[in-house]
Amino acid sequence: MPDAPAQRARLLFDPIELRYDFGEGHPFQARRLSALIDLLQSSGLWNPHDQQTALPLRPATVEELGLIHHADYIAAVQSLSRPLAEQTAQERQEREQLLLRYGFADGDTPAVPGMHNVTASIAGGTLAALSAVMGLPEGGHFASEDEQPLHVFHPGGGLHHAWAERASGFCVYNDSAVAIAHVLQATGAKVLYIDFDAHHGDGVQRAFYDEPRVMTISLHETGRYLFPGTGDVLELGQSLGRGYSVNIPLEPFTEDDSYIEAMEALLPPLVTSFAPDVIITQHGCDTHAWDPLTHLCLTMRGIQAQVRLAHELAHTYCQGRWVALGGGGYDLFRVVPRAWSIVWAEVSGQALPAALPEAWVTRWCAAWLEVQAAEDAAQQSMGKTPSAADFPARFLDRPEDFPASPRRWSISRTNRHTVALARHLLLPSSLRQAFPTAQTRSPLAGLVDLLHIRGSDTPSRSVMIETTGGPLILRDFCPPSLVERLQPDSGLRAFARLPAREHQLLLGIARRPDCALTIAHTPAGEIVGEVTLAPGDSWWEGLDNVYEVAIEVSSNWRGHGLATRLLAFALELDALEDMLLFAEGLSWHWDIEGLGLSIYRYRELIAHLFATQGFAEQPTTEPNINLEPANIFLVRVGKRVDQRASAQFFNRVMSSPNLARL
Ligand SMILES: [Zn+2]
Ligand SMILES: [Zn+2]
């Protein structure tokens, strides 16, 4: 990334974090952090004594922890933190009960002496990191804006499984949730949390399940067989937070290419529609093929792609404000130090060296072989004895060490279905059209030719109309060159939240030959409304001539009858009589919050608007409607559509083959 002032990236690490350790034999050990810091130092990527790139840590206070965690849970953690020898007889008696009640009894997250201070410090670190990039006093004081960090990497953070009222999955306090809650309290900002760990980021999702100012996105191995078991696509958030929890459960043995495809199909449009002020990413590297606890099969290429995309999104959408965290990662010496060095190299804009320093390899290969030998002895392993040749010599992986899974094709196909369902449920159609995936991009590309005035040389129709708000020009088949010359009105932000991005989105749609864009603009060149017509997404695969209609009118131009006239203009072409048109899921699409209408009244208005153009409301098993009773499904069957095609369509509407997956 073009990020010249490297001093604006900082790494937060404090030796106290090395005390977050569950001991020999437990998968979570702090030695992975020692190996990381050693690698950063010996490869010259970071020096802990360089004040310009370090960020100090201070423990989170009990009040700060209390933003997320229940007071009785914090008290229990404090009590369980005291060494047994210092506890009274009564405390020791209560101890068993506390262990059971607060999640410390299952063996995953044992109560360790001193754990309150250590995890409060980790939470304080993430809180300081996020505060620093948000310019809050808890992030520290910086002499000038140039010194205020833009990106912070906190490898000790990312304890994403901790719940408000219990420890879970090696996590005691949820540092991300505490830091996010602090920012919500101190500012009006919206926070995007992206969790790349192989396990579902359940603790952070739970903390903000009904909070529309926080979007959580978790890409993880499906919970069918893996802890914590949650993270289904249909976990979408609740009440006002509906649509702000995003889950992409991936198949076991998913490899880099399929992972990258899923990430790229979802993250840019989701970030566009949410318009966050800051991004936090959790880079648990237990997604790596060598990780002993999970079954995803990423290499360092996939891990590098996560951090590159996060970096790009932070600069494109959040003025660079970005905090990256560690997380899971249980191949302590071969994977974690390399993965998080890759994260830091990207965060700090440094070139990644090719080879690992030889002295570092010697030190940590010895530590690794020792652990392997101990495990082999314990399990009386008959397998091949690991040798120094199995320890990597380079930061990136060698592809030849990771042979393709024979099931690669079917794994990718299943992941593609999961992504399509998530896009279908979470993204308004305009966004899906502006950010097509390789699969939805229609090879036919013929809509413009088909609808348009075949053989005619006028590029688009236009008409001037008078409204109570003033004169407007309506144009169809707007080419990108025209959209570029116009400006979006300030009230045009239902899909992308910010007018400038709405403009980008319209440009994207105008560039697609398989979409038709109709706009309304003022004589001065301000876009105040738009209608898009696009082929139905992969949900409607296999059906011909099925097109989705979406409409948006600037909030400054409502009540002037514009929506009805714009929709009529966009749909009056005779060629449209060959098509099946539908509109759906509208409660997600318009900025209904600003309208002051109940969802039921809103639904009525939409039904009435589309009825003026021959649409009728249809019952359907379509998940967008099924799962959102406030949504509506409207269909218009063109006069020349033959009976067989329409029967096929209505068949699909009532019994989608994809529904079996739900
Ligand atoms: Zn940057
Ligand atoms: Zn994990």
Image: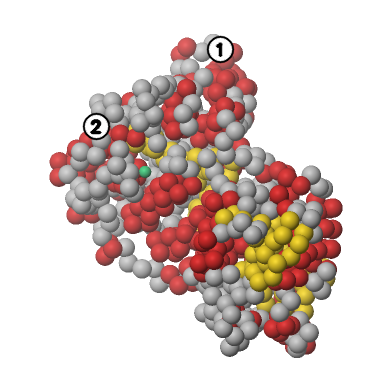
Q: Which mark is residue 47?
A: 2
**Does 589 appear above or below 82?**
below
Q: Quadrant of the C terminus?
A: bottom right
Rendering colour mode: secondary structure
Figure check: 287 above or below 26: below
| Whole-number angstrom distance, CA of label 1 to CA of label 2 | 47 Å
State yes or no: Cβ of the residue under disc 1 lies below 8 Å from any atom of ligand 2: no
Q: Residue at x 57, y 20 (%)?
A: 63
Under mark 1, the amino acid is: Ala
**Residue 190 shows in this picture:** yes
- Count neighbours of disc 2 (C-alpha within 10 A) and say few if under 14, some if 14 to 19, many if 20 or more: some
Query: In the figure, 28 relative to 544: above or below?
Result: above
* Residue at x 26%, y 44% (from the top left corner): 350
User: Residue 320 placed where, x, y %?
Assistant: 42, 42
Q: Nearer the viewer, mark 1 or mark 2?
A: 2
SS assignment at label 2: loop
Residue 123: x and y, percent? Answer: 47, 28
658 relative position to 116: left or right: right
Residue 383 percent across, percent down from the top left? 29, 57
Identify the mark nearer the N-term, 1 or 2: 2
**Is residue 462 found left or right of 383 in the rendered image?**
right
In this rendering, would 397 be left or right of 308? left
Residue 42 picture location, percent across and down? 19, 38
The residue lying furthest to the left in this view is 358
- Number of numbered discs: 2
Which residue lies at the image location 61% right of the left edge and 69% below the top edge? 517
Q: Say which element carries label 1.
A: helix
> What amino acid type is highlighted by mark number 2?
Asn
The answer to whether residue 424 of the structure is visible from this angle is: no
Query: Which residue has dot 1 on it?
Result: 89
